[in-house]
Amino acid sequence: MSTLLPTLALLAAGLGASTGPAPQPAELRHLAAQNDLLAKELALAKGKEFYLLADPAGKTLKLLYRGALLQQYKVDGIEVGVPQVAFRSRVEPGTWEGRVWENGALDPPRALDRIEIQAPPPTPEGTEIPAVVPPTPEEKYPVPPRYHIRFAGGLSIEVRTPGPEARRGFWGRMAASLAAWWDDAKAAASSSPTDTLRLHLSMPKQDAESLYRALPPETKLLVVPQTP
Amino acid sequence: MNGTTITRTAVCSAGSGMVLSDWGGKRKWVFDTPRGMFKVRTKISDPIWRKPDWEFVSEGKPLPTNPADRFESGTLGKYALYLEDGYMIHGTLYTRLLGRSVTHGCIRLGPEDLQAVWDGAPVGTPVYIF
């Protein structure tokens, strides 16, 4: 009996330690949301597609493959734009973050101008083919100052670089802004493409060009919720 | 990379994206570098290149009947790191073409960068191409 009492006392102390204050519902929701996000990241890391991880709060955009960070793009600013129809948003707020968007594609697409060569007829001496120095990627793939990565389901990332208008005066910037607005208005009036939500990314020119030239086809996207 | 830290950057050459058809139009080769994750399978110093059929076809030469005519040394530089599916990271004689899409799918590096990769990437090292 004398040895049993200390054991019971220790057990009681252990039980007491494990029964702290119950987690608040908000904390539970936060942990559940974090766990959900990690589960999605894990699923992406196990997949065979390249994926982007956008963190509006941290102002980062990362390109990953199987969980490995391949490239981190510097983002100067991220804005979220929700096109409205008759003053109503096309998507419910909060349903686009923490969701995996698929089949990302560049708009305008990166031209893949394959050169097809028919081999000359074989001769014992061979045929002297004139050597052609191909262009560099920078020469081959000009990057527009404003482009989109559109995902199935309606999310679109609009990437803007500080173009020549940044160096212009007030009226030059105003003209560029109006031109961009007019392009958006035309896109909104047409039936395609149907963006339901846009992430506007302002990136340094070098990063924006790198993203345009390197984005793999059918990339996925996960937007980290700002308040998981 | 070491973890998420970039330890070295290098200019390389990758696949040209060109499509080559033989004279009869029966065979076709696409010179792309595949994207994805690969591993260094083997490392060879002073590699000898076994010329594939497309090398002869592209030069308008008949395919050799003597297998020895396919082998050439020096073309791949000092080292070759073999990845899956016959693709390699190797050196080049044409360093002025680094940074351009000129290869038949392999990745070419300049001599100093190739040495750094050779020293730092043991067999089994993952290689991500994107």
Image: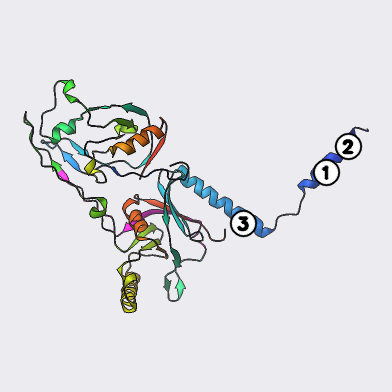
Q: Which mark is residue A13?
A: 1
Q: Position of residue B124 (x, y in %)?
A: 42, 31
Report whether B5 appears left or right of A188.
right
Q: Nearer the viewer, mark 3 or mark 2?
A: 2
Three-letter amino acid code at the position of disc 2: Pro
Q: Earlier in the sequence, mark 3 or mark 2?
A: 2
Residue that protrudes farthest toward the bottom in the picture? A171
Is A108 magenta? The answer is yes
Report whether A84 appears left or right of A106.
right
Is B87 magenta? The answer is no
Pointer 2: what residue? A6
Q: Do tags 1 and 2 sit on the same chain? A: yes
The quarter of the picture where residue B105 lies is top left
Q: Which residues are magenta?
A: A94-116
Q: Which mark is residue A158?
A: none
The quarter of the picture where residue B95 lies is top left
The quarter of the picture where residue B82 lies is top left
Pointer 3: what residue? A30
Q: Position of residue B97 (x, y in %)?
A: 22, 43
Query: Height in image: A142 above or below B65?
Result: below
Q: Residues within 10 Å of mark 1 (few under 14, many from 20)?
A: few
Three-letter amino acid code at the position of disc 3: His
